[in-house]
Amino acid sequence: MSRNVQIYEESKKYTPGGVHTSIRSVDPFPVFVKAQGAYIYDADGRKYIDYQAAFGPFILGHNHPYVNAKVIEAIGRTDLYGVGCTDLEVECARLICKHVPSSEQVLFCNSGSEATYHAIRLSRAVTGRKKLIKFQGCYHGWHDYAARNMLSAWEMIGKRDPGSAGMLDEAVDHTLVCTFNDLDDVERTFRENKGEIAALIVEPIPHNIGCVLPQPGFLQGLRELCSANGTLLIFDEVITGFRHDIGGFQLVAGVTPDLTTMGKAMANGYPIAAIAGRKPYMERFNTNPGGDVWFAGTYNGHAVGTAASIATIELMENEPVHERIFRLGDRMRAGIREIHERLGIKAFVAGFGSVWTTYFMDFEPKHYGDLQHNDASMYLSYRRKLNENGIFKLPMNLKRNHIGYSHTDEDIDVTLEIIESVLKELRS
């Protein structure tokens, strides 16, 4: 029995399913024990070029020496006090306000789910309304407010599709589901629920389903509809924030939301998340004397996350992080497209910047419903074969891949060679 399997079987004795978040339970199941730069190593000693990047936090690469050194330096002198603020919290918040257009003030928490929960609660307090708009296929965390109509079965698209047993019916039914890239659908939903919608929350690029790009004018249209209806616009940039630009995808798109949630790439793998937004809204939180919207968390603003975020953002400011990962992303997508054309593979390579995925379908998807045309069996077989050949991508349908600052041109070359070999094998 392999060491990977031994560890996994042992884990299942003490943990339901053997894993500590649901989406980690995949087959085959390598147990990773070491990581450095662009590479991860499993318990059987196999090396992989990592494009999973733990769902995206590792924009610089695993165990980045500058980030690690700043974290070690910080925890050598400070950690957590449960009172007041620290210099690290102040500097981290200042850097976010400096770069992210919507950020006039910031609060730190520990996960993207916490951040979106707080953003939605704040929106309801500001507007005095209850309803929320989200989009089919998008993911905004595990809480009842937003955990519906995520990776729905095709026959459940647009229907009532709670993501979990035990969810409150009231929470599910106050969350309205629209179609991404369809402004008419959003406008109709506003019209049918006039004066009732507190917030619209959106992944500016729905990376939960790979990489479905917003069509020209869509995000601006959402901004205009929210403004016209007195509704707060929330950009969930937990994935896109800092990865697609130091100012988030809102800076790329030229659309400024009222509130923004961030996490993942802001600290290169260390745990921290944030909610940011306009000062009049943020000051409703009860961290501000007189605020009436509850905000709390024992580990909020911990030295580890804030130090890591400062270091990560400093590197983005001072080194060509985005220039490099965008260039490598362009190389990867162009190389894969050339392979598809040469081999006669019917596929669409989607992506932005350092993110890409290959849908096995012959047109660009505009929303979740289009993705039922993706050949899911081929998608999974392809990714599993790549894993077997040392290229790690999560072996699940509709998942994205990430390039980091530690990846090299040689890594891209090797990956493209293996992709071609795998596609030839699958084609035959």
Image: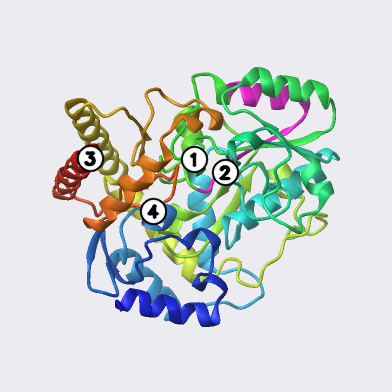
Neighbour tally class for label 1: few under 14, some 14-19, many 20 plus, Cα within 10 Å: many
Q: CA distance from mark 2 to mark 1?
A: 8 Å
Residue 78 can be seen, yes or no: no
Q: Quadrant of the N terminus?
A: bottom left
Q: Residue at x 69, y 55 (%)?
A: 164
Q: Is residue 293 magenta?
A: no
Mark toward the viewer: 2 or 1: 2
| Identity, as a three-letter code, of the amino acid under mark 1 | Ile
**Percent of width and height locating residue 79:** 52, 77
In the picture, measured across the screen, residue 302 lies left or right of residue 322, that is right
The residue pinned by badge 3 equals 423
Q: Is residue 229 magenta?
A: yes
Quarter-wise, where is residue 339 in the image? Answer: top left
**Which label is found at residue 209?**
1
Q: CA distance from mark 4 to mark 2?
A: 16 Å
Question: Mark 1 or mark 4, which has the lower sequence index?
Answer: 1
State how the image is colored: rainbow
Looking at the image, is 226 positioned above or below residue 30?
Answer: above
Question: Mark 4 or mark 2, which has the lower sequence index?
Answer: 2
Marks 1 and 3 close (CB-CB < 8 Å): no
Mark toward the viewer: 4 or 3: 3
The residue pinned by badge 2 equals 151
